[in-house]
Image (spheres, rainbow, N blue to C red):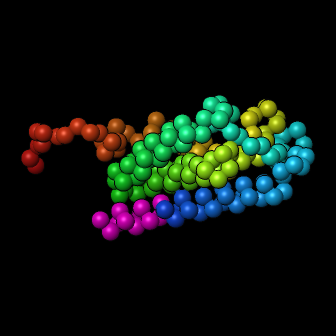
Amino acid sequence: MRKKILILFMDAVITALLLLADQFTKYMAILHLKDAPALVLIDGVLELNYLENRGSAFGMLQNQKFFILFVGIVFLSVILFLLFKLPNEKKFIVVHVCLSAVIAGGVGNMIDRFRFDYVVDFISFVLINFPIFNFADCCIVVSVVCLFILFLFVFQEKDLEFLSFKQNRYREIK
């Protein structure tokens, strides 16, 4: 039990640090990029360009604040449930870190929706005309890709038995 509490505490610390980084970068974007021309970091590749996103990913669901918040709260609840269910084994530490980063990203964007009614986006990957995004989005996307790779290629089926809701009615006696 003590180990689980320590791991969950570390999850909270990781989440808090990433959330602070997200809010700080958005604050800096508002301070330095709002009402200013794009700041070119790598010509033709990467710019910092302020945008107020009133939708969800890629600008979908414009002005659907309450629906987006509801879906976000549901997803965060599922992720918190998974964090509590994860075994206290070393091989799941990276899953804890990834889920903590997803929580930080989700909460970071939710804070913007509550405060401003929009999410502050400012990172523009102009090389492929990708939608403008922010640090929270990076936390979510990178973590989800890592989790996808882990669950698809690294973990075996027996490693994921903790996710099962089945009750083992006929246990073998050893």
Left or right position of 140 against 41: left
Could you tell me residue 73's position as x and y percent? 48, 45
In the image shown, does 31 or 131 lie closer to the viewer? 31
Q: Quadrant of the N terminus?
A: bottom left
* Vertical order, 12 against 162 (above or below): below
In which quarter of the view is residue 88 placed? bottom left
Left or right position of 148 against 55: left
* Vertical order, 140 against 104 (above or below): above
Q: Is residue 20 visible?
A: yes
In which quarter of the view is residue 3 placed? bottom left
- The residue that appears at 61% across and 50% down in the rendered structure is 114
- Is residue 136 inside the magenta stretch? no
- Is residue 5 inside the magenta stretch? yes
Q: Main secondary structure of the magenta part?
A: helix
In the image shown, does 23 or 54 lie closer to the viewer? 54
Left or right position of 146 against 159: right
Residue stretch in magenta: 1-11
In which quarter of the view is residue 172 placed? top left
* Vertical order, 164 against 60 (above or below): below
In the image shown, does 168 or 106 lie closer to the viewer? 106
Could you tell me residue 75's position as x and y percent? 47, 42
Could you tell me residue 163's position as x and y percent? 33, 42
Number of dots carrying numbers = 0
- The residue that appears at 65% across and 35% down in the rendered structure is 63
Q: Is residue 149 visible?
A: no
- The residue that appears at 78% across and 54% down in the rendered structure is 29
Find the residue positioned furthest to the left: 173
- The residue that appears at 41% across and 44% down in the rendered structure is 78
Could you tell me residue 153's position as x and y percent? 47, 37
